[in-house]
Image: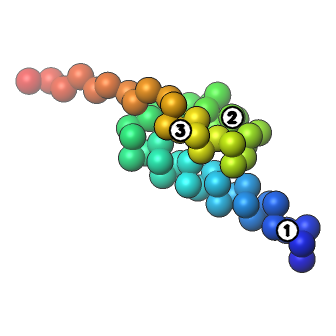
Amino acid sequence: MAAYVPAIIWIVSAIICHHIAKARNVKANLMRRLAVVLLGPLAIPLAFIVKPETSIEAN
């Protein structure tokens, strides 16, 4: 059972990172998704560091 704990932490941190990025309007591209998969819980602070996308609204 203890062997599953790191995997659960990794998955939960990926979900948290996704929600933070979505709330900050950060677009998830391949490189950012790979960073989340490889870094796991360490990717959560990166979601705060990445600059949000700016959308150009048509008038």
Residue at the spot of label 3: 47
Quadrant where the N terminus is found in the figure = bottom right
| Residue 25 x %, y % | 38, 38
Where is 47 relative to 58, above or below?
below
Where is 15 relative to 34, above or below?
below
**Comes first in the chain, label 3 or label 2:** 2
Residue at the spot of label 2: 35
Q: Label 3, label 2: how many angstroms apart (C-alpha)? A: 10 Å
Residues at circles 3 and 2 in contact by the CB criterion of under 8 Å: no
Q: Residue at x 46, y 34 (%)?
A: 27
Q: Name the colouring of the figure.
A: rainbow
Where is 51 relative to 7, above or below?
above
Q: Label 1, label 2: how many angstroms apart (C-alpha)? A: 21 Å
Image quarter of residue 5: bottom right
| Residue 22 x %, y % | 43, 45
Query: Observer-nearest residue: 42 or 32?
Result: 42
Query: Observer-nearest residue: 27 or 40?
Result: 40
Give the SS element for disc 1.
helix
Q: Residue at x 49, y 37 (%)?
A: 48
Q: Label 3, label 1: how many angstroms apart (C-alpha)? A: 25 Å
Q: Residue at x 63, y 51 (%)?
A: 14
Give the SS element for disc 3.
helix
Residue at the spot of label 1: 4
Please state if 3 lies on the left or on the right of 58 as rendered: right
Numbered disc total? 3
Image quarter of residue 52: top left
Which circle marks residue 45 in the picture? none
| Residue 36 x %, y % | 67, 41
